[in-house]
Amino acid sequence: MTDYIVCIQYKEMANTLVSSSSEVQTISHHASIQDEIQKLSKAGTTSLKNNEAAQALSMFKKAYILADGVPEMKSQTRCLFSLGAAYIAMGKPKKGLK
């Protein structure tokens, strides 16, 4: 009977570790996505400053696609704002303000 109880306790500990490990992986995955979003956004901003609106639009679109998969709305909002700026820079203000 003691072996059975030890086995159950061990299984519960293992489940807790697996659950914690999954949460850590999810958190680090979101962090790496956020890092990529920031890199793309920074590259887009640089392209806009260099009058390369098409390149900026491409970077901002990629950033938004990534941000759409993250539960944090701030990233999505920032990417949409940047997309709007790129469309305006390309001479498409109606689309940029949409």
Image (spheres, rainbow, N blue to C red):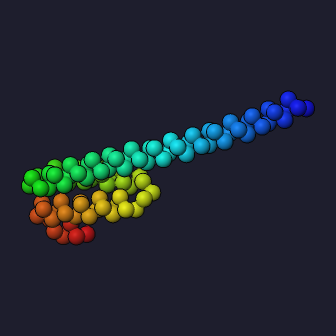
Q: Is residue 38 left or right of residue 25?
A: left
Residue drawn 85% across and 29% down? 3
Residue drawn 66% across and 42% down? 16
Quadrant position of the C terminus in the picture: bottom left
Where residue 20 appears, as percent x and y from the top left, is: 60, 43
Residue drawn 44% across and 44% down? 29
Q: Is residue 17 above or below residue 59?
A: above
Quadrant position of the N terminus in the picture: top right
Q: Is residue 96 above or below residue 2?
A: below
Query: Does the image show residue 54?
Result: no
Q: Is residue 46 left or right of residue 12?
A: left
Where residue 95 appears, as percent x and y from the top left, is: 21, 66
Query: Does the image show residue 45?
Result: yes
Residue drawn 12% across and 62% down? 89
Instruction: Name the residue at the left extreme.
Output: 51
Q: Is residue 91 left or right of residue 35?
A: left
Count of all numbered marks drawn on residues in the image: 0
Instruction: Name the residue at the right extreme.
Output: 1
Instruction: Name the residue at the top extreme.
Output: 3
Closest to the observer, 90 or 76 = 76
Where residue 17 appears, as percent x and y from the top left, is: 63, 39
Where residue 72 appears, as percent x and y from the top left, is: 42, 59
Closest to the observer, 88 or 11 = 11
